[in-house]
Image: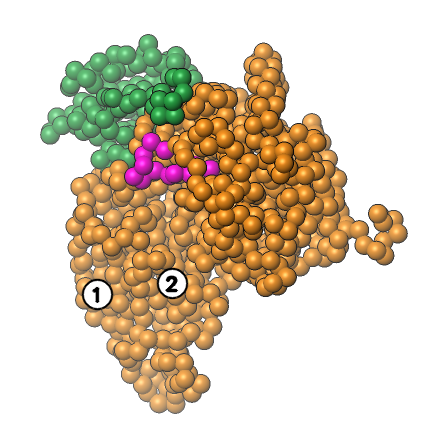
C-alpha cells in the first residue's frame, strides 16, 4: 500500500458531498496489484456520500489495475478511461459507478485555469 | 457508380471496392473496422490468378452485400465459363460465402485464392504510414489464419476460419477446386475480431447486450426499430424513400460501447463510427418525435462522461459535455486525446436543450430529475469556463495545439471561420450559433428548474441572464449595414463578418430579435446562400467560398433541417418549405440516403446534387434530417399534454400522413396536404 493511495481513500467521505451530486448508488470493489501482492478497497457510493472499507465481497462494479497506476490516477498523472482503453486497467460491471468514482481524481499537477491563460494572452483583466 | 461498398453493424463496418476486395489505402479507410481498429487491411479474391470483375452488386441492406463477379477483365465476360458470388454480412463477426459456378459442360479445375492481411491500424493512423509501435504476428493454423497485435496490455486479434480445405500461408488461403459440368463450389470464411481484456477474454463477451448477435437477431432488431416508428403515408416518393432509408440507417448506426456497455449511436461511416457529443445530440433532437427510445442512453452517457476537472490535453473543464469518444490504440496510449476529448464549444448548451426537448415530448420527468446535477453543471459551464474572456459570450480556444481541434463549433475544419474577405481571425473565437444555443439552454433550463426541479429562483435567474444575453448579442453581432449577424467575434471583440448558414441556427434558438428575423430569412433563401437544394455553409460571394469546400460552401442536410426548424419557429413556413423541398429532392440523387454534405453548386447549373468527395454516408444527423423536415412540414409541437399539429406542406408535395406519433399524449396521427392551384378549400 502506498501513502498516496491511503491518503486518497481517507479524503473520500469528506469530499463526497461536493463530488457525488448525481443519484448514483452502488459498490465499487478495487483490486490493486503489485507483483504477487494484492490489496482490496471497497467504496460504497451514494448521493453525497462515500464509505470506504478494506473488505471484499460482491459488488456492482470491479476495477483491476496496478498500485502504481492507481497512484498515478489519484495524483492526476494518469487518466482513468485511457488506461482502460490500453488495457492497463479493467472494469467489469456498472460503468456509471466508475465514471462517478473517477470524479475524485484530481487535476494534473501544474494545470492552470484556462480563463486566466486566455485573458492574459488577450490582455484582458483576469 | 459508387467506388466503395460498405456494410455496417453499429461501429463494426467493412468498406471494400466494387469487387468486394480490400487493398491497403491511405486516403480512404477500406477494410474491416471495429472499435476504431482495422482488423482486415487486405482481402483480395483471385481465380486462377486473375482478379474479378463486378457484374452487379446487391447492396440494398446495411449489413449484407452480394457481389456477382466474373474472372478476368471486362471484355471477356460475355462468354464467361465461370462466375463467382461473394455473399457477405456483418454481425459481431464478418462472414463471407464464396460460390464458384462452372457454366461449362465439362469438368474444370480452379485455383481460388484470398489474399489476407491485418495491419491493426488505428482509425487515426490510416492517413499516415508510420510503423506500429507494437508487435504483429501471423500464424497459419489448421483451417485458420490468425493475426495478432500486441502493445503492452493492448491486444487485438483477427482470426480467419475456412470451412473448405485450404493451403494456408501467412498472406492468405488457397483453394484447389474441381467442379463437375455446371457444378458449384461453396465455401464460407468467418472472420472474428477479438479485443482482449485483462484476463485474456474478449471484452465484448462481457457486454450486457452481447456483442456477437446473429444476422437474424440484427435484422429483427432493425425491423423492431423501424416498426416502432410512426408510419408515413405520402404522395411524394423522395420523402417516402428517404424516410425508410433513414430509419434503417439509424437502426444500423447504433452500437454497443465497449467501455460503457450501452447502445449508443455512431455518428457516421467511415470516419466517425463512434460517440460524438454534438452529433448525437443533434440526431437525438431530430429523431425525438419518431424514436424517443433512442435518446435516454445517449443523454445518460453524455452526463456520465461530463467533464469534471481541467485537462489541457483533452480540452476538458468541469461541466463540459464531450466532443468525441474513441476506443482505439491512439486514444489508449494518449497519442490522441479522445478518451474522451472535450473540444466542442456547443455540446454543453445543446445537452440542456436536448434534455428539455426530450421531456416536452415524452413527459419523462424521472430522467430530468436524475440528470439535474449534470444539467446544472452544464449551465454553470456556460458562464464560467465557457466564458473564457469574461465578456458574457461563450468562446473556444484549444489548449492542445498538436492534436486538439482549432475550431470547436460544428464547422470544425481549419478554414471554416473567416471574415468576409477570407482572412482568418485569431483565437479565442465566439461563433454566433453558440451564443444562440447558450440563450436557448438558459430558457429551457429555466423551464426545467420551474417545472421539475422546483427551483423558481434559479429559473428567474436563468431567464434574466438569457434576456441580457439576447440584448447583448443583438447589439454586438448584428451588422446593421448588411442586415445579418456576424459569423463570430474575434479575440478583440470585433465581428467576423462572413455571411454563413450559422445565422439559420440563430432562428432555431430564438435569440433573434423579431425585427431582425425577416432580413435573416431573406438572406437564408437569397441567391448567395440558397443553392436551390439547400442553404450553403458559406455564401457564394465570400472570400473562402468553394462549392466543394467541407464547411465553406457545401450544403449540409443536417444544417438545413435546423434552419428549416428555425424558419418555422419565426413563422416563415413557406421559406421552411422551400428548404424541405430542396433537400428532399436532393435525396433522390443519393438513393434516399442523404450524405454528410453535397456540393454547393446552383441547382439550375447541374440539376443534379453532387456528393462531397469524401462525405460520410450513412451519417446519423443526415439520416435524421428527413425526420426533422417532416416535423417542420407537419408543424408538430408539444404543448403541455398535447401535440399541436399545424401543417404547411410545400406546394407539389401532395398529402403527407404520419400515423402513431408517440409522446406524452399516447399516439397521435397528423395529416397535411400541400396547397395547389386546383384546391378550392385551402387556396391562398
Magenta-span inclusion, residue B449: no
Residue extending farthest to the right is B680
Q: Are marks 1 and 2 on the same chain?
A: yes
Look at chain B in the picture and name its colour.
orange
Name the residue that disc number 1 marks. B171
Chain at numbered mark 1: B
Chain at numbered mark 2: B
Residue at mark 1 to residue at mark 2: CA–CA distance: 18 Å
Viewer-nearest residue: B61 or B205 = B61
Quarter of the figure with residue B614 = bottom left
All told, the count of numbered labels is 2
Element assignment for label 2: strand
Residue depicted at x 29% and y 39%: B402
Quarter of the figure with residue B235 = bottom right
Element assignment for label 1: loop
Look at chain A in the picture and name its colour.
green
- B278, above or below B544, in the image: above
Residue extending farthest to the top is A14
Circle on res. B326? none
Residue B350: give x, y in percent of width and height.
52, 32
Viewer-nearest residue: B570 or B674 = B570
Residue extending farthest to the left is A35
Amino acid at each position: 500500500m502506498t501513502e498516496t493511495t491511503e491518503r486518497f481513500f481517507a479524503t473520500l467521505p469528506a469530499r463526497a458531498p461536493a463530488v457525488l451530486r448525481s443519484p448514483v448508488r452502488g459498490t465499487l470493489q478495487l483490486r490493486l496489484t503489485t507483483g504477487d501482492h494484492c490489496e482490496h478497497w471497497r467504496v460504497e457510493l451514494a448521493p453525497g456520500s462515500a464509505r470506504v472499507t478494506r473488505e471484499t465481497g460482491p459488488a456492482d462494479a470491479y476495477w483491476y489495475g496496478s498500485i502504481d497506476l492507481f497512484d498515478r490516477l489519484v495524483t492526476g498523472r494518469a487518466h482513468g478511461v485511457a488506461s482502460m482503453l490500453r488495457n492497463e486497467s479493467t472494469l467489469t460491471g456498472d460503468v456509471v459507478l466508475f465514471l462517478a468514482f473517477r470524479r475524485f481524481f484530481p487535476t494534473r499537477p501544474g494545470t492552470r485555469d484556462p480563463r486566466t491563460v486566455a485573458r492574459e494572452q488577450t490582455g484582458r483583466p483576469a | 457508380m459508387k467506388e466503395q461498398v460498405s456494410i455496417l453493424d453499429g461501429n463494426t463496418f467493412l468498406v471494400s471496392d466494387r469487387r468486394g476486395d480490400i487493398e491497403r489505402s491511405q486516403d480512404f479507410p477500406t477494410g474491416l473496422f471495429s472499435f476504431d481498429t482495422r482488423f482486415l487491411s487486405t482481402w483480395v479474391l483471385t481465380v486462377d490468378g486473375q482478379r474479378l470483375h463486378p457484374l452487379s452488386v446487391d447492396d440494398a441492406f446495411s449489413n449484407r452485400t452480394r457481389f456477382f463477379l466474373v474472372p478476368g477483365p471486362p471484355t471477356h465476360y460475355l462468354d464467361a465459363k465461370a462466375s463467382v458470388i461473394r455473399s457477405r454480412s456483418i454481425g459481431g463477426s464478418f462472414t463471407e460465402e464464396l460460390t464458384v459456378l462452372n457454366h461449362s459442360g465439362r469438368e474444370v479445375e480452379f485455383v481460388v485464392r484470398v489474399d489476407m492481411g491485418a495491419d491493426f491500424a488505428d482509425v487515426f493512423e490510416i492517413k499516415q504510414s508510420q510503423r506500429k509501435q507494437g508487435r504483429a504476428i501471423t500464424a497459419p493454423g489448421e483451417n485458420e489464419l490468425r493475426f495478432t497485435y500486441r502493445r503492452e496490455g493492448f491486444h487485438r486479434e483477427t482470426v480467419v476460419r475456412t470451412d473448405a480445405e485450404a493451403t494456408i500461408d501467412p498472406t492468405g488461403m488457397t483453394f484447389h477446386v474441381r467442379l463437375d459440368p455446371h457444378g458449384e463450389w461453396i465455401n464460407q470464411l468467418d472472420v472474428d475480431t477479438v479485443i482482449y481484456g485483462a484476463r485474456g477474454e474478449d471484452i465484448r463477451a462481457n457486454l450486457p447486450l452481447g456483442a456477437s448477435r446473429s444476422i437474424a437477431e440484427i435484422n429483427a432488431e432493425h425491423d423492431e426499430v423501424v416498426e416502432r416508428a410512426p408510419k408515413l403515408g405520402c404522395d411524394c416518393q423522395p420523402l417516402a424513400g428517404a424516410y425508410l432509408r433513414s430509419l434503417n440507417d439509424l437502426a444500423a448506426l447504433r452500437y454497443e460501447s465497449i467501455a460503457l456497455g450501452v447502445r449508443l449511436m455512431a455518428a457516421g461511416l467511415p470516419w466517425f463510427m463512434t460517440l460524438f457529443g454534438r452529433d448525437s445530440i443533434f440526431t437525438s433532437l431530430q429523431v425525438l418525435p419518431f424514436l424517443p427510445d433512442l435518446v435516454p442512453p445517449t443523454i445518460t452517457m453524455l452526463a456520465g462522461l461530463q467533464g469534471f476537472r481541467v485537462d489541457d490535453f483533452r480540452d476538458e473543464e468541469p461541466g463540459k459535455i464531450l466532443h468525441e469518444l474513441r476506443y482505439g490504440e491512439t486514444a489508449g496510449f494518449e497519442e490522441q486525446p479522445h478518451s474522451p476529448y472535450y473540444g466542442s464549444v456547443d455540446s454543453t448548451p445543446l445537452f440542456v436543450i436536448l434534455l428539455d426537448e426530450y421531456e416536452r415530448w415524452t413527459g419523462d420527468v424521472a430522467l430530468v430529475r436524475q440528470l439535474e446535477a449534470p444539467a446544472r453543471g452544464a449551465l454553470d459551464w456556460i458562464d464560467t469556463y465557457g466564458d473564457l474572456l469574461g465578456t458574457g459570450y461563450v468562446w473556444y480556444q484549444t489548449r492542445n495545439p498538436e492534436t486538439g481541434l482549432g475550431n470547436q463549433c460544428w464547422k470544425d475544419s481549419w478554414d471554416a471561420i473567416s471574415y468576409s474577405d477570407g482572412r482568418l481571425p485569431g483565437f479565442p473565437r465566439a461563433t454566433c450559433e453558440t451564443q444562440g444555443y447558450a440563450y436557448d439552454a438558459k430558457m429551457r433550463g429555466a423551464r426545467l428548474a420551474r417545472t421539475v426541479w422546483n427551483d423558481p429562483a434559479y429559473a428567474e435567474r436563468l431567464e434574466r441572464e438569457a434576456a441580457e444575453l439576447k440584448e447583448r448579442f443583438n447589439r454586438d453581432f448584428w451588422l446593421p449595414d448588411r442586415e445579418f449577424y456576424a459569423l463570430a467575434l474575434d479575440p478583440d471583440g470585433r465581428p467576423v463578418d462572413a455571411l454563413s448558414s450559422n445565422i439559420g441556427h440563430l432562428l432555431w434558438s430564438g435569440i433573434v430579435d423579431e425585427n431582425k428575423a425577416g432580413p435573416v430569412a431573406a438572406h437564408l433563401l437569397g441567391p448567395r446562400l440558397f443553392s436551390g437544394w439547400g442553404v450553403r455553409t458559406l455564401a457564394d460571394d465570400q472570400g473562402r467560398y468553394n462549392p466543394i469546400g467541407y464547411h465553406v460552401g457545401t450544403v449540409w442536410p443536417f444544417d438545413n433541417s435546423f434552419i428549416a426548424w428555425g424558419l418555422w419557429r419565426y413563422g416563415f413556413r413557406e421559406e421552411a418549405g422551400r428548404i424541405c423541398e430542396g433537400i428532399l429532392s436532393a435525396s433522390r440523387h443519393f438513393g434516399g440516403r442523404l450524405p454528410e454534405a453535397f456540393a454547393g453548386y446552383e441547382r439550375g447549373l447541374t440539376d443534379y446534387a453532387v456528393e462531397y468527395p469524401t462525405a460520410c454516408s450513412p451519417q446519423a444527423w443526415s439520416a435524421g434530417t428527413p425526420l426533422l423536415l417532416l416535423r417542420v412540414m407537419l408543424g408538430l409541437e408539444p404543448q403541455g399534454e398535447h401535440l399541436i399539429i399545424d401543417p404547411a406542406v410545400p406546394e407539389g408535395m401532395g398529402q403527407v400522413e404520419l400515423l402513431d406519433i408517440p409522446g406524452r399524449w399516447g399516439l397521435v396521427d397528423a395529416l397535411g396536404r400541400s396547397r395547389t392551384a386546383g384546391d378550392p378549400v385551402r387556396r391562398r
